[in-house]
Amino acid sequence: MTESLTVRDNRTGVEYDIPITDGTIRAADLGKIKASEDNPGLAVYDPGFVNTASCRSSVTYIDGDKGVLEYRGYPIEQLAEKSSFLEVSYLLVHGALPTKEEYDAWVHEITFHTFVHENIKEFMQGFRYDAHPMGMLMASVGAMSTFYPDAANISDPDNRRLQIIRLIAKMPTLGAWAFRHAQGKPYVYPDNDLSYTGNFLSMLFKMSESKYASDDRIEKALDTLFILHADHEQNASANAVRSVGSTQVDPYSSVAAGVGALFGPLHGGANEAVLRMLRRIGKVENIPAFIEGVKAGNERLMGFGHRVYKNYDPRATIIKQQALNVFEVTGTNPLLNIAMELEKIALEDEYFVKRKLYPNVDFYSGLIYEALEFPPEMFTVLFAIGRTPGWLSQWLELVQDKEQKIARPKQIYTGERGLTFVPRDVRWA
């Protein structure tokens, strides 16, 4: 039996039978509902796209009520524990886990595309000493489109794959150089003997030593964070990548748009806000007063709740364990005790439980980044490096989807109409 929705237009008395597919109705079917033939059909007003599907996707599945996150059908918990970031990247881009031969070739290709053109280095060196790393990353990703003009040929599958490899490979290089730039330190070139994450840490922190070696626990924690950030369905930055990509521009320009969206504090800057909150609380003894302040509307509880998840964010549990592993190496951050006690109280307090305010991915990630001595302005750069394969998977899906059109949302016009222009010499007389 075909599912459908019967809509009666009380303006005309006409009834419409609208098909339901995958729990959705097509906006074009609503457009057939008109008060008269001369009037436009109905449209949907949905600021922020809170209940509007813009695409069909097989990349990421989320069930916010149950706290489920899957990449290509695989639970995030299994991927974080048993996989690596590059294997997850392959899964997202290709839609299936690689064979050993496919994985080895994938890792080899990405490893040997980590270097960037020397002119990009000069481009980045041109920024002010205090330039924000995300601004540098956004600009340098966009600039890469001028170094690889062949990327504009998005209809060629082999060409698309090459650009995807280049972007995943070069993002850590650009991110690390933005970090070094802010510190006034010389840029460190990639070391192809190291793993993806190990090479990134080397480009970040190497000084005079001939070979940089990172602690395995630090490398694993950062690799896990990259996995957890790799994709998250149709969030603001993925939507930006798809919207810009719908013009059929090259992937560098599309990903630069994603970086720009992630730059916004409502998207990528939440973990920094958590750190500010924990520092303001100061010590465990101050938590009860802070909780009362939240209930009274005088304080904001950062790192709890999520637009999608109405249950415990599955990524939060994984990050909490990785934070403990990192602190074994770096020493415990005193803010950790405040965070854990705050989490305990919030999960038991009826006020927060009733509102389904559970810890999200940002609650512990900032503590890890701070322990690794990243300044807050670098947190979002790390997020962007991890999110790159997700953005590219969304972009790749978009350019192969025959239903997709150039993004062009409707609007509800609220301005003046039919005004008569008065020339300057009359208006100013």
Image (cartoon, grey):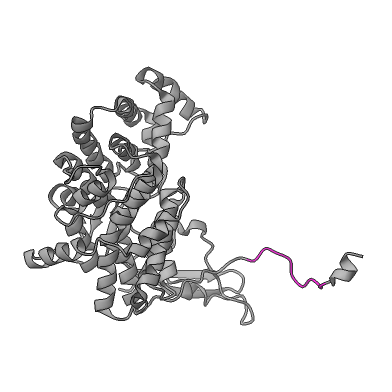
Q: Residue at x 36, y 50 (%)?
A: 381
Residue occupying the point 44% across, 68% down: 244
Magenta residue span: 413-421
Q: Identify the image quadrant of the N terminus.
A: bottom left
Name the residue nearer the viewer: 332 or 26: 332
Q: Position of residue 140 (x, y in %)?
A: 40, 60
Residue 165 in the image, given as x and y percentages of width and height: 25, 66
Say left or right for 166 vs 15. Answer: left
Q: Quadrant of residue 306?
A: top left
- The answer to which of 202 and 4 lies nearer the viewer is 202
Q: Is 420 colored magenta in this rendering? A: yes
Q: Residue at x 88, y 70 (%)?
A: 425
Q: Residue furthest top?
A: 285
Q: Position of residue 243 (x, y in %)?
A: 44, 67
**Within the magenta stretch, is there residue 324?**
no
Q: Position of residue 426 (x, y in %)?
A: 90, 69
